[in-house]
Amino acid sequence: MGGNTFGQVFRVTTFGESHGGGLGVVVDGCPAGHPFPRARIAAQMARRRPGQGKLTSARQEADEIQVLSGLEPDTDRTLGTPIMMMVGNTDARSRHYDDLAELYRPSHADYTYEAKYGLRAVAGGGRASARETVGRVAAGALAEDLLAALAGVEIVAWVAEVAGVAAPAVDEAALTREQVDAHAVRCPDGQVAEAMTAEIDAARRVGDTVGGVIRCVARGVPPGWGEPVFDKLTADLAKAMMSLPASRGFEVGDGFASTRLRGSAHNDPFVPEAGTGRIRTTTNHSGGIQGGISNGEALRLAVAFKPVATIFQPQQTVTRDGQPVVFQAKGRHDPCVLPRAVPMVEAMAALVLCDHMLRARVARTDGPRR
Amino acid sequence: MGGNTFGQVFRVTTFGESHGGGLGVVVDGCPAGHPFPRARIAAQMARRRPGQGKLTSARQEADEIQVLSGLEPDTDRTLGTPIMMMVGNTDARSRHYDDLAELYRPSHADYTYEAKYGLRAVAGGGRASARETVGRVAAGALAEDLLAALAGVEIVAWVAEVAGVAAPAVDEAALTREQVDAHAVRCPDGQVAEAMTAEIDAARRVGDTVGGVIRCVARGVPPGWGEPVFDKLTADLAKAMMSLPASRGFEVGDGFASTRLRGSAHNDPFVPEAGTGRIRTTTNHSGGIQGGISNGEALRLAVAFKPVATIFQPQQTVTRDGQPVVFQAKGRHDPCVLPRAVPMVEAMAALVLCDHMLRARVARTDGPRR
Amino acid sequence: MGGNTFGQVFRVTTFGESHGGGLGVVVDGCPAGHPFPRARIAAQMARRRPGQGKLTSARQEADEIQVLSGLEPDTDRTLGTPIMMMVGNTDARSRHYDDLAELYRPSHADYTYEAKYGLRAVAGGGRASARETVGRVAAGALAEDLLAALAGVEIVAWVAEVAGVAAPAVDEAALTREQVDAHAVRCPDGQVAEAMTAEIDAARRVGDTVGGVIRCVARGVPPGWGEPVFDKLTADLAKAMMSLPASRGFEVGDGFASTRLRGSAHNDPFVPEAGTGRIRTTTNHSGGIQGGISNGEALRLAVAFKPVATIFQPQQTVTRDGQPVVFQAKGRHDPCVLPRAVPMVEAMAALVLCDHMLRARVARTDGPRR
Amino acid sequence: MGGNTFGQVFRVTTFGESHGGGLGVVVDGCPAGHPFPRARIAAQMARRRPGQGKLTSARQEADEIQVLSGLEPDTDRTLGTPIMMMVGNTDARSRHYDDLAELYRPSHADYTYEAKYGLRAVAGGGRASARETVGRVAAGALAEDLLAALAGVEIVAWVAEVAGVAAPAVDEAALTREQVDAHAVRCPDGQVAEAMTAEIDAARRVGDTVGGVIRCVARGVPPGWGEPVFDKLTADLAKAMMSLPASRGFEVGDGFASTRLRGSAHNDPFVPEAGTGRIRTTTNHSGGIQGGISNGEALRLAVAFKPVATIFQPQQTVTRDGQPVVFQAKGRHDPCVLPRAVPMVEAMAALVLCDHMLRARVARTDGPRR
C-alpha cells in the first residue's frame, strides 16, 4: 500500500533513505536460470552515480551493489527466488542537513512528506532523494539483460534538451550508449552537448539549476506486448517515468506534436516487409504502440524533467510553525539531473518491458507468440 | 493480469466489447454508507455519450446505467460490497464491420490485438473502442461524488487545444463545468471554441480527423495525498490518463515548459496564508504535487490526444495475410475525440484521487490528517 | 481492497447480493483462443443450484448464466479480454426477510456486516448468502476446462462425512463425478449416503441442521506448480476453501492425522516409475505438495463445513439496539450445505490450479516445464 | 508474481536463502509515527531461533536484526516508508549439504523446486528452509506491536499437541506467553509438556521426528475486521498459516469438530453484555469470526504441522537422474518444529490482523468504527 512496489510479474520493491543504513531493492519474479549480469548492473550503476564530473553532484558514492539472495552460489544463475540487491550508505554528511529540520525547502518534498506522515527523514531528503533510484537502476539493468537475452530488445536513452537547447533528431535505429556517453551531458550531438554544458555552467555559476528532456528508444520489442485497457504499454511507461524524481511530463510517439497533425498525416500505414513478409509500418508516429500494445516498431518516448529544486540563492519559505523565513541551501547538488537520469529512464523502460514480456506468456492458450 | 483493474483501495474492473452483450464496471472498495449519486453519474454519462451533436459520432446510445449490486434497496446507500454498473449494447450495427475482419486498419489496434491474442473482436473495435470508457466514466462519477462529499474536491476539465488552435489561460480557480459546456467543443472561450469547431469541420469535410489537448484542474485536494515512490500522484495520474484511448502525452504542473525554466523561476515559494495560517505557495508551477504528494494547491494536468485513426480517405494497409490493400473506412466516427474525452479525463482523475484519499487513511498511526 | 477479487493471473472478481439485481463474476486474464465451455459451466451450475431435491433448499433458481463479454461472436472462443458472466435474481421473496432487519441472527453475518459497514443488505443475507458462489462456480468451471485442455488435470470432490457419518476411503485415482452424483447427498458410497441422508432428515424434522466434510482430489497436476513462500499451493488452496461460506477447517494430504505420524512413516519415498522413468512417490501422505509446490502426485485436500446457521428452532439473540429477543427463522434453507458445496470446492480448487498453471509459465527463462 | 509478498496494506516481502548472504524482509505500508519495537522483535526472534535447547536444532544463530531503513534516526519512530530488516548468515556449514546436490530428499522441496525452476539452492534447503521465517517473525513482531498500541490486541500461541499427546483445554482468556514459555516445549501444561518432551526424545533417539498442533488465540479484536468474500479473516488466516513450512492443516473456531455438531448446538447466541451493553456471544464455537468478519470475541485457531522431513534413518529415494539410491541425512535438524513454530504462528496471525486493522479504516465513509 505504501507504493514501493512496481510491476506485476517482474516485481521490484525498493527501500532505503538517502542517509540511513542503506538502499536497495528486492526483485521478485525474476525467471530462474538466467546468468546474473554483474557487469551490466555495475555499468548502469556507474552511469547513475553522482560525482562523475563537474556536471553532477560532488558526492562520492561507490554504490557497489551487494547481492544477498536469489543466486546459485557457484554458477551465479538466478534461482527464481527474490534477488535482494543493496548499497550501504557511506559518504553521508548528515550535518549539512541539521538546519533543514525546522523549515520546508521550496518545491521539495519536505512539506508534503510531513503533511502525509507527520514526520520526515530530514537528512538528504530521506526517501525523496534521487538516491532512491539506486534500486531501480540495479533492477532495471537485470531487466534489460533478460530483455536482451530472451527477446533481443535494446534500450537507449539520451539527453535531447537542456534548458531549451534541443538536439536535432538522432538516428534512433542505430544510436548506441557509447555514442550517448561520448559527451558528459549524455547528448550524442557534440555541438549541442557543448551548448547544453554551457547552459548548465551558466546556471551553476549563479547558484541556479536547469531542466530538460530525455528521449528513449526501445528496439526489438516484438508485436503483442502490453495490455489493452489500464495496463497499456503507454500507461505503464507513463507511470514508470512519472515516478522518477523531478519528472513533469511524458510523451510516446509524436506526443504533444501529434495533436497538431491530422489523422491522414499521423496514421502509420502498414506494409509487408520486403523479404521477410513481416508486417511493418512505413512511419512510426505511434511510437511502436497501438491500442496499448506493441506493433513491432521501435518504442519511442520522452520524459520532461523540471529544473532541480535545490538552488544556491536565497529563497522565501516558511518554518514548520508556518513562520516566513529566508532559506539558503548549502551542500552538494546537481545543477542538472539530466545526465544521471539517462540510466534511470532506461531502467524504468526495462522494468516495464520485462514485466510485459513475461505477461505476454500468459495471454494465449498456446503460450506466447514466437 | 489482463490489466482491466485500476486502483488499490477504490478499485475498478471494467469489462465489455463495443458490440457484445454489454459493457460495464465493478467497483470494489467503495466505502459503505454513501448515497449513490445517480444524477451525477447520469450527467457524466450524457457528456461522454456520442451523438451529442454534429461534432461527435452519429451513433445513438442511451447509455443508461443499470446498477445490479452494492446498494441498499430502499435507501440507495452504498453497502460496501461491489457495485456493478453496466449498459447494454443496443445500437450496434455490426454489418459495418464485416469487411474489416480480413485487414488491419492503420493506427488502430487490429493488428496488435491479433499479435497478442491470436484473434480479435472485429465489430466496433471490440475492447479497443472508446466505448470501453463507459465503465470508467460511471465509476469516475461515483469517485468524484465521494471526493466532493468527504473532502470537498472539485474536478473540472476542458478542451484547451484542437488542431493547434489553443485557448488562452483560463481562471482555473473558478472554472465550472457549465462554462465548459457552454460550447459544444467544450472549450470555455467562445471565440476559440468557434475556431476549434471550424478546424473540426474543415477536417470532417475532407474525411479527415484532428487531435488536441485537454487540461484538467482538481481543486480542494488537501496536503498529504499520494505515495512517495512508484505511486506518486504524478505517476498514477499519468498512468490513468495514458490508459485512455488515443492519449499520447501527459503533463503535470508546467510540464514540458518547466524544462525551459531555471530552478529559481520554477520553485514555488511557501508562505503562510493570511488569516488561516495555512501553508500555501505563491506560485503553482508544481501543479500541486511535490515529491509525488499533494501540497494543498490545485492539481493541474494536461493530456494530449492524437487525431482519430478512422479517416474517410483511402489508406494503404495490409490484409491478415500480409498482402497490400487499400482501405476505405465507412460508418460513423468522431472527427475529433476531444469534447467527449473531457468527462473521461475527469473520471480518471477522480479514480486516482479517490483511491489516494482512502489510502491516506492508513498512512499514519493516528489516522489521516484532519 | 474490498476483497472480492481472487487470483493473480487468472483473476476473478465477483459481485452481487442474494436479492439484488443479479450476481456474477468478471474473469480477467483468461487466455485467448479457448473454446468457451458452456456445457461444463451449465453442468456445474446445475450441481450448485438449490432446489435439486429434498436435501436442499426449495428455492427455485434457473441460474442460467448470461455471458456479456469476452467471447468472439461466431466462434465462442475466448478473446483474452474480461469475461463477464451473470445470473439475474428472479425468485427472490424478500418479504421473508422483513422482520430480520431489526435483529441479528445467531452465527450469521448480520452483526459483523453492520459492525464493519454500518449497514447491511437484509434480504437473503445479501452478500453473505451462499448465492454469492454463483460467480465462483461459473468461473471455476471455465478454469477447470482450461486445466483439462492445457494440462490434462481432473478435479473431483465428494461428501466424505456428514454429521459424523464418515465414508470409507474411496479410490481417488478413479473416482468420477458420475459416481459422486449417483446419490443425492454426493457421497459415492451408497450405504453411507443413505446413513448421511437419514442424519440430514432427522435434523430437518426437528428444525435443525448438520455439517460435514468434503474431500477433493486433483489428478494430473504436473510437478512444478505453486510458489515457495506465501503463495504455496497449500496456502492458496487453504485461502480458497476457507473463503467459502460456512467453512471452518482445511487439510492437505494427511492433514491433522499427519501430526500423529513419525517422519519415517510420513515421508513419501521417491522411486523411478517403471517404464516412464518419471519420478514418483510410493506413498502420498504429502497430498501431492512438497514445499508448497506440486510433485506430480494427486492433490488431496479436505474442507470442514459447520452446520448451517439457519435453524427452525427458537433462539436467543439481540436486536440492533442490543435488546434480548427470541428469534424464530422462517423461509427456505438447506438443512445441510454439503451436497451443493461439492461443486463449490471443485470450483475453488480449479481457480487456484488454473492460476498456478499460468504462473508456472513465467517461472523460468526457458518457459514452463513441458 | 514470485509469491514472496503478503498483505494488502501492511505488506511484507521476504527474501533470502538459508545459506546465502542473508535473509530479511521489507515492510511496506507500516503507518508512520510508531515507536519501533526493538525489544519485542528481539524477544520473538529469540523464541524463533534454533539452538534454544536440546529440543531444537543445534545450529547457533545470533539472528540479530539489522534495520536499514524506514526509521527516524534520533527517535526510532517509523517514517511510513519501507522498513528493511535483515540478518546475515554466519553459521552456515555448507559442506554438510554437498552430497545432497545430486539426489532428492524424501518429502523435502528438493524435487519440486527443481521441477519448477530447473535448479535449486542446495545448501540448507535454500528458500525452503524454516530459516526463511526470520523475516516473517521480525515483521510479525512489528505488526503485533501496532495491534497492541492501536487496538489493544494480544496474540498468544502454544503447543497443544505433539505426536498425539494433547494438552487439555487452557484458559484462553488469560493465557500468557510467559506461561507458554515455562516449558521448553511451549505447552503451558507442565505434565503434558513432560509427556511431549518424552515423545520428542524417544523419536530423536531413533533418528526420527514428530509433528503436532499449535493453537493460537487473539484477544481484543474489535467487531468489523475482515472482508466478506475472498479475504475473509478465516481465509487470510488459513493462507497465512498454511504458508508456514510443514503446515498441513488449519482450523478456526471448532474446526473439524464443528462438523459433528448440529446447528442448534453450534450457533453462538448473542446477548447484551451486562454493564457495557456491548453485544457479545455466550459461546464461541465460531472462533470470533462470522461471515469472514470478526464479531468481537476471541479469535481461536489451530495449525497442524507434519513431522519434520529430515530423519536420521536410511531412506529410499532417487538421484537427479532418476536412479534409486539410499539416502542417510547428516547435520543438525529439529526433531520437532513445534516449539519454534509458536512465534511463527503468532507472527502470521499478527500480519493478517494488522493488515485488516488498517483495511477497516477504509470500509466506511465515516472512517473506521471507533
Image: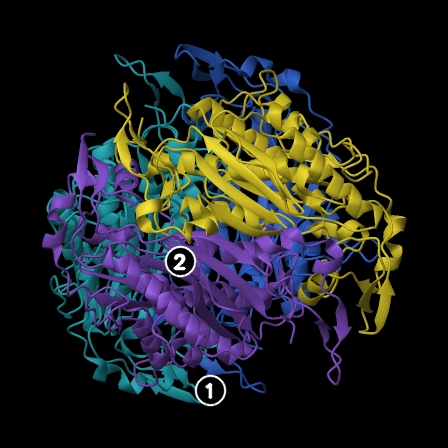
Chain colours: A purple, B yellow, C blue, D cyan
Q: Which numbered disc, 1 or 2, marks the residue closer to the eye?
A: 2
Q: Where is residue B238 shown, x and y percent of the image?
A: 50, 48
User: Can you give x and y, in whole percent of width and height, for residue B17 in the image?
Assistant: 73, 47
A22 versus C68 height, above or below: below
| Left or right: where A253 falls relative to B275 | right
Left or right relative to C120: residue D281: left
**At 47% across and 73% down in the image, what residue appears?**
A156
Question: Residue at point 32% right, 62% down?
Answer: A200
The three-letter amino acid code for the residue at tag 1 is Gly
The image quadrant of residue C111 is: top left
Residue D161 seen in this snapshot: no
Q: Which mark is residue D322?
A: 1
> What kind of residue is marked 2?
Ala
Q: Secondary structure at mark 1?
A: loop
Q: Measure the C-alpha gap from mark 1 to mark 2.
A: 66 Å
At label 2, counting other C-alpha atoms closer than 10 Å, the crowd grade (few under 14, some 14-19, many 20 or more) is many
- Mark identifier at residue A163: 2
Give residue D344's mark.
Answer: none
Q: State the image coordinates of residue A76 (x, y, percent, origin top left).
A: 34, 82
Same chain? Circles 1 and 2? no
Q: Is residue B44 above or below residue C11?
A: above
Number of dots carrying numbers: 2
Whether residue B262 is visible, yes or no, is yes
Q: B71 or B297: which is nearer to us?
A: B297
Residue D183 locus on image (x, y percent): 12, 51
